[in-house]
Image (cartoon, helix red, strand yellow):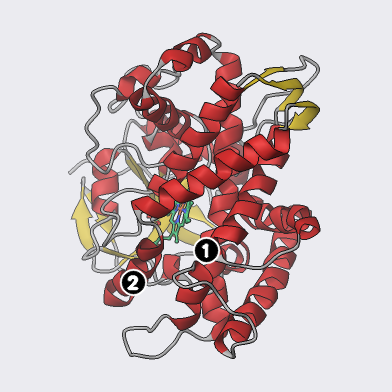
Amino acid sequence: MNQVPTEKTLDHSLTLMNEGYLYIKNRVDRFGSNVFHTRLLGQKVICMSGEDAAKIFYDSERFQRKGAAPKRVQKTLFGEHAIQTIDGQIHIHRKKLFLSLMTSTQQNRIAQMVYSKWHEKVGSSRPSMILFEEARNILCEVACEWTGIPVKKHEIPHLAKDFTDMVYAFGAVGKRYRRGKKARKKTEKWMKSMIEQVRNGEIKAKNESALQVMAFHRQLNGKRLSSHMAAVELINVIRPIVAISTFITFSAVALHEYPAMKTKLEVADSTYYDCFVHEVRRFYPFAPFLGARVKQSFVWNNCFFKKGRLVLLDIYGTNHDPQLWDEPHRFQPERFRNWRSSMFDLIPQGGGHIDNDHRCPGERMTITVMKASLDFLVNQIEFQVPSSQDFRYILSTVPTLPKSGFMMKEIKKVN
Ligand code: HEM
């Protein structure tokens, strides 16, 4: 039996921080193995990458999410005891709740709201804007309206920043982490009071709005979620909608870096927009890896997965795996023309089945909103891109973003 490679030296947490998105991929390439042992945050960890690894990772007989997400991620990104950290029937029941909010009618509705908001914010012309900031404000405003949460216009930029701070605290230490933690505490308190006001009738939530559905959802045991838990899960709807701003920003970077794409998109049908959006989600970095714990000991690829061991699945590396993607470091939407998803190959929002596994329930919504925003950028406006900005994004920072947030000038409506 071949030995599974093991990282030498005591702990690799610092190396992980230094190499960020490339930590797992660098070792998979160096060891010539899609699985290896390492030690992170004081514990033994197995890292794995690629389609077969993803298939194993989503086998719920072998892995569980309970105990996998570090407290610091729960205190910023997910919220404590949220859907990301539960398993089995309780998870499937909670997942149904999320999916019930994200029907195709609702995906189209939210995309239409985003598209109208872009028109409203740009008007007939606008001297300049930073795309990332504008996108997160628009998405926050739309997300609040769509979920039925009453907010005043002037509160939107602060709220949008709080939601982004939660996302950008992942993988951070120091100030960035503290900002995310503070934002979560504040937002949970606010959402909790909103849920309580809906329950006691002080706020009348629209029928079937996410606010109303979360407030009155019944768990498998027939009980309502605690008002705190309902708040956490409501944030799990709004925060990721705001996070689509990152992919919208990367879409603009792609249009700028590959100008021929714009010409293609101007005359393309909706199918090519799907290809482009898939390629943005594959090519550019966002979620780096996923974690789960071994539920029952087993052997896979000569590797012993001991019960309780933390295992990381490489998202970035799988999306750039040369065994799956021809010339993975080339931006090439055409690769998705006749693509048939195996459910474990393109995994920027997780893999497996959307209903039973932890795969992102907002994936279709993300695609629809990205397509609407791309249509606006390509067909509705003309703009200049000042060369005095820094588009670079650093793979050692997780999550990352083009440094300038993508600055646009002399924006003019053309339609
Ligand atoms: C789960 C990424 C948008 C709601 C996930 C997962 C990833 C992800 C990587 C984890 C999958 C796993 O654990 O196996 C993203 C990215 C997005 C996005 C990159 C776009 C920027 C959305 C949207 C929503 C959403 C728009 C809701 C409106 C969720 C929820 C989960 C989740 C509730 C937990 C699912 C579960 O544990 O069963 N997402 N997501 N996400 N996402 Fe998204």
Q: Where does label 1 land, which residue?
A: 236
Quarter of the image that includes the C terminus = top right
Tally of numbered discs: 2
Residue 40 at x, y percent in the picture:
52, 55
Q: Position of residue 50 (x, y in %)?
A: 31, 38
- Is 175 situated left or right of 240 in this image? right
Can residue 276 be seen?
Answer: yes
Q: Which tag is nearer the camera, tag 1 or tag 2? A: 1
Q: Residue at x 73, y 27 (%)?
A: 124
Q: Is mark 1 within 8 Å of ligand 1?
A: yes
| Alpha-carbon span between mark 1 and mark 2 | 14 Å
* Residue at disc 2, secondary structure: helix
Task: Give the answer, above or below, for where 414 lies relative to 11.
Answer: above
Looking at marks 1 and 2 on the same chain, the residue that comes earlier in the sequence is marked by 2
**Mark 2 Cβ and ligand 1 under 8 Å apart:** yes
Q: Is residue 134 left or right of residue 273?
A: right
Vertical placement of 248 versus 157: above or below?
Answer: above
Residue 294 image point, x, y percent: 31, 64
Indicate whether 91 appears above or below 377: below
For label 1, count other residues whose C-alpha is less than 10 Å away and answer few (under 14), some (14-19) or many (20+). some
Tell me the quarter of the image containing the N terminus. Answer: top left
Occupied quadrant, residue 345: top left
Dot label at residue 34: none
Disc 2 residue crowd, few under 14, some 14–19, many 20+, Cα 10 Å = many
Q: Is residue 36 left or right of residue 138?
A: left
Q: Nearer the viewer, residue 309 or 336?
A: 336
Q: Is residue 133 above or below residue 147?
A: above
**Which quarter of the figure has residue 4?**
top left
Q: Which mark is residue 91?
A: 2
The amino acid type of the residue labelled 2 equals: His
Question: Which residue is painted at 24% across and 48% down in the image?
Answer: 55
Q: Where residue 403 appears, x then y in whole percent?
A: 72, 31
